[in-house]
């Protein structure tokens, strides 16, 4: 046996044994994944509804490719930890995978042209954010204690201003949860004060972004207040869901590989399950009107009776059918989607209002259409042109964030990219204002030139982007 382990390259027996064990382990993982793919393919025919898509070869192909991409994303997370590119691939294609089961009879028939939009563009974008995540860079050396002290002092000031703004907005328009009108017939615009609400939104997310850079006692004070005011009292499910997702991402990075421990996995599943149930329950409460009955199953023509399942399906998987409406629209052939945030920044409100003025294209109860809709609306089948520019800009932003070790902004960008199955919040004007303002404050916390020296401070502090 010892003789068999000897190699010409001088490797020791231990090295050879380790290599053989690694090879066996890889074969086992591959075998498990092949088994999962075959099992899921059989489940597809059992769970998929009897529509024209059930035996449609394009739909089956989309199911298989989406499943493979999801497995690759999970493998990458297990190997490299949570990164923007792997959570994007996992979340985006997980819901596309679910879409192929055709729970709603409103869904369109899958066509070969769908492969171009569902895979080529998103996978191209994933290459840009992969580069932004993995490109080797020299990180800025920062003294964490000084940053945390200065950040805490600045955020206290921001919090006071936010409280004053919130009180002023309340005196002008009140709170949505106490509305005299039924919540079903109210909109967020009715409870916004032009200019002031946008500033409050910027300050709100700036405080959330600084959570990883502040003292714990401030986080315990500020985060619950923001959830209570901007989520509960304003009856905004989106704010609650996004803030909780931000905290989950932050938690995952803090725990690192220990996150894969069974107890932590169970805890994460419990939290996500509670969020999903809460989302469905609030959706039903919001639509309550005894004079005009709202039935989520009838409106979405679902095959299932579960209200929670139908709510989640319509806000996730159905988005991939809404985007198909955009495929046949006449393109603008202008980069309107990329110009909107900059036009808002320089005060061109007319351009922004005109961009959002076209009628919404909806299916069932949702008009959400993934992050691709703006690019397809602008350039049609040539959407890859604008998408490539967008991907390059996000790549540069990721590199800048990693260079400065601004973990909070990294989590913020990642949070929105996780929601790309729902829409593109990174091209909204308020995202740009939040990113610029938070970067400005973060740089103010590092004005000590001695601290701004090239180095590998991120690894010394125990964190890595």
Image (cartoon, rainbow, N blue to C red):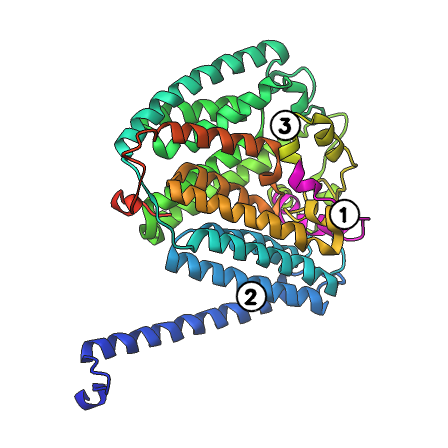
Q: Earlier in the sequence, mark 1 or mark 2?
A: 2
Q: Which residue sits at x=50%, y=68%? A: 36
Please tell me whether residue 344 belongs to the stretch shown in magenta: no
Q: Which element carries disc 3, helix, strand or loop?
A: loop
State how far apart marks 1 and 2 are (Cα): 41 Å
Query: Which is more toward the observer, 427 or 312?
Result: 427
Please tell me whether residue 316 belongs to the stretch shown in magenta: yes
Q: Residues within 10 Å of mark 3 (few under 14, many from 20)?
A: few
Q: Which element carries disc 1, helix, strand or loop?
A: loop
Query: Which is more toward the observer, 458 or 245?
Result: 458
Is 69 left, or right, of 109 in this rendering?
left
Residue 40: which disc?
2
Relative to 83, residue 280 above or below? above
- The stretch in magenta equals 312-339
Residue 275, image x and y in percent?
A: 50, 39
State how far apart marks 2 and 3 are (Cα): 51 Å
Q: Which residue is mark 1?
A: 333
Q: Which residue sits at x=58%, y=25%? A: 235
Mark 2 or mark 3, whichever is nearer to me: 3
Q: Which element carries disc 2, helix, strand or loop?
A: helix
Relative to 277, residue 91 above or below? below
- Asked if one can make out residue 318 in the rendered structure from this viewpoint, the answer is no
Q: Earlier in the sequence, mark 1 or mark 3?
A: 1
Query: Which is more toward the observer, 420 or 347?
Result: 347
Q: Which residue sits at x=38%, y=72%? A: 26
Q: Residues within 10 Å of mark 2 (few under 14, many from 20)?
A: some
Q: Which residue sits at x=51%, y=52%? A: 129
Relative to 372, residue 56 above or below? below
State how far apart marks 1 and 3 are (Cα): 23 Å
Q: Residues within 10 Å of mark 1 (few under 14, many from 20)?
A: some
């Amino acid at each position: 046996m010892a003789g068999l382990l000897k190699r010409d390259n001088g490797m020791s027996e231990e090295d050879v044994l380790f290599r053989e064990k690694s090879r066996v382990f890889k074969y086992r993982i591959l075998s498990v994944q092949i088994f999962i793919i075959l099992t899921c393919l059989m489940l597809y025919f059992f769970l998929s509804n009897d529509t024209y898509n059930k035996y449609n070869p394009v739909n089956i192909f989309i199911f298989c490719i989406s499943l493979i991409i999801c497995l690759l994303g999970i493998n990458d997370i297990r190997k490299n930890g949570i990164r923007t590119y792997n959570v994007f691939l996992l979340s985006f294609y997980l819901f596309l995978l679910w879409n192929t089961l055709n729970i709603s009879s409103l869904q369109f028939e899958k066509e070969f042209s769908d492969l171009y939009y569902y895979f080529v563009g998103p996978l191209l974008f994933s290459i840009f954010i992969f580069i932004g995540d993995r490109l080797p860079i020299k990180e800025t050396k920062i003294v964490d204690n000084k940053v945390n002290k200065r950040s805490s002092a600045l955020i206290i000031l921001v919090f006071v201003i936010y409280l004053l703004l919130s009180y002023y907005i309340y005196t002008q328009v009140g709170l949505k949860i106490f509305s005299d009108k039924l919540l079903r017939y109210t909109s967020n615009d009715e409870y916004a004060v032009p200019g002031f609400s946008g500033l409050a939104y910027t300050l709100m997310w700036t405080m959330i972004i600084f959570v990883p850079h502040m003292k714990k006692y401030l986080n315990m004070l500020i985060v619950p207040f923001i959830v209570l005011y901007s989520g509960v009292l304003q009856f905004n499910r989106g704010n609650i869901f996004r803030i909780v997702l931000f905290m989950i991402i932050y938690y995952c990075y803090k725990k690192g590989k220990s996150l894969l421990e069974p107890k932590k996995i169970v805890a994460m599943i419990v939290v996500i399950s509670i969020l999903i149930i809460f989302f469905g329950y609030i959706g039903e409460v919001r639509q309550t009107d005894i004079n005009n009955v709202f039935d989520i199953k009838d409106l979405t023509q679902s095959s299932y009776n579960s209200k929670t399942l139908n709510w989640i399906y319509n806000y996730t998987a159905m988005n991939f059918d809404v985007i198909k409406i955009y495929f046949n629209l006449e393109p603008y052939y202008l980069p309107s989607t990329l110009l909107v945030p900059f036009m808002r920044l320089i005060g061109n409100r007319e351009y922004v209002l005109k961009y959002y003025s076209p009628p919404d294209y909806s299916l069932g109860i949702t008009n959400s259409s993934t992050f691709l809709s703006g690019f397809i609306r602008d350039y049609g089948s040539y959407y890859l042109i604008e998408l490539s520019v967008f991907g390059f800009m996000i790549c540069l932003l990721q590199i800048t964030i990693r260079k400065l070790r601004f973990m909070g902004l990294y989590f913020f960008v990642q949070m929105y990219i996780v929601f790309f199955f729902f829409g593109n919040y990174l091209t909204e004007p308020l995202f740009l204002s939040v990113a610029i303002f938070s970067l400005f404050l973060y740089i103010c916390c590092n004005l000590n030139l001695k601290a701004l020296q090239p180095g590998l401070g991120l690894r010394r502090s125990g964190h890595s982007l």
